[in-house]
Amino acid sequence: RSLSQDAVSVLGTRAVWTVMSMATGIILARMLGPHDRGVLALVLLLPSTVVTLAKLGITQANVYFINREGYSAKEVASNATTLALGLSAIACLVCWLLRDWLLATVLPSVEPWALALALVRVPLLLLDDYLYGVLQATGQFKLYNTRLILSESLRVLLVVGALLATAVSHAHLIVIRDEPLGERAEREARRQA
């Protein structure tokens, strides 16, 4: 494949990913409201920020060592995986040790369990970034594009599933709450008749 085909392929995938991400964001904004959406944005932004600080240029180094130095992709991917897991463990530990300060200043409306859940994303995001460099160096853009679309599709499905679960839960609560009122109203109507 040519460079232009790869570039168009990645650009097209990114465009589809952006539209899907935007749709998910709109759904979440409508479902959560301004305050809770802001809290969710903070929780999602923390892992991205940690990953940005922990990247250390490894993705670019992966491309360099495969294409310029002739290292095997398998060897570089193995090292990248080890680095991603090690660096993310250190980054998560630092964030967890600073949790009181983070929750008091940067993430004031976030519960500690949500912080812990957000930190789970750090190794996944870092590993994804590092291995993208390996895919880029070996020219496997189709695999990368497929993975990107599948992950965003899964996110959309999870959001829709959460919406449905929430709607069913609310409908069930309404039925439970209204049932005794309905029975009471029937008793009142019979008594008055």
Image (cartoon, rainbow, N blue to C red):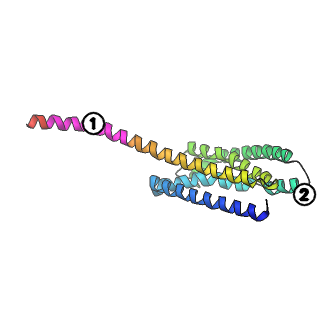
Q: In the rendered image of this protein, does residue 23 appear above or below residue 178?
A: below
Q: Quadrant of the C terminus?
A: top left
In this rendering, position of residue 142 left or right of residue 107: right
- Neighbourhood count class around disc 1 (C-alpha, 10 Å): few under 14, some 14–19, many 20 upward: few
Q: Nearer the viewer, residue 122 or 16?
A: 16
Badge 2 or badge 1: first in the primary sequence: 2
Q: Amino acid at mark 2?
A: Arg
Eyeballing the image, is 6 above or below 102?
A: below
Residue in front for this viewpoint, 34 or 22: 22
The question of residue 180 being in magenta is answered with: yes
Q: Is residue 36 magenta?
A: no
Residue drawn at point x = 58 percent, y = 51 percent: 43
Residue placed under numbered mark 2 in the picture: 68
> In the rendered structure, which segment of residues is drawn in magenta?
171-188
Q: Type of residue at label 1?
A: Glu
Helix, strand or loop for the magenta stretch, by majority = helix
In the rendering, at what x and y percent does residue 65 appear? 88, 54
Task: Give SS at disc 2.
Answer: loop
Residue farthest to the bottom?
Answer: 4
Residue 101 seen: no
Q: Nearer the viewer, residue 90 or 150?
A: 150
Picture quadrant where residue 105 is located? bottom right
Q: Quadrant of the N terminus?
A: bottom right
Dot 1 falls on a residue whose secondary structure is helix
Near-viewer residue (91 or 60)? 60
**Label 2, label 1: how many angstroms apart (C-alpha)?**
72 Å
Across and down, in percent, residue 180 comes to 25, 35
Where residue 118 appears, as percent x and y from the top left, is 61, 47
Q: Pointer 1: what residue?
A: 179
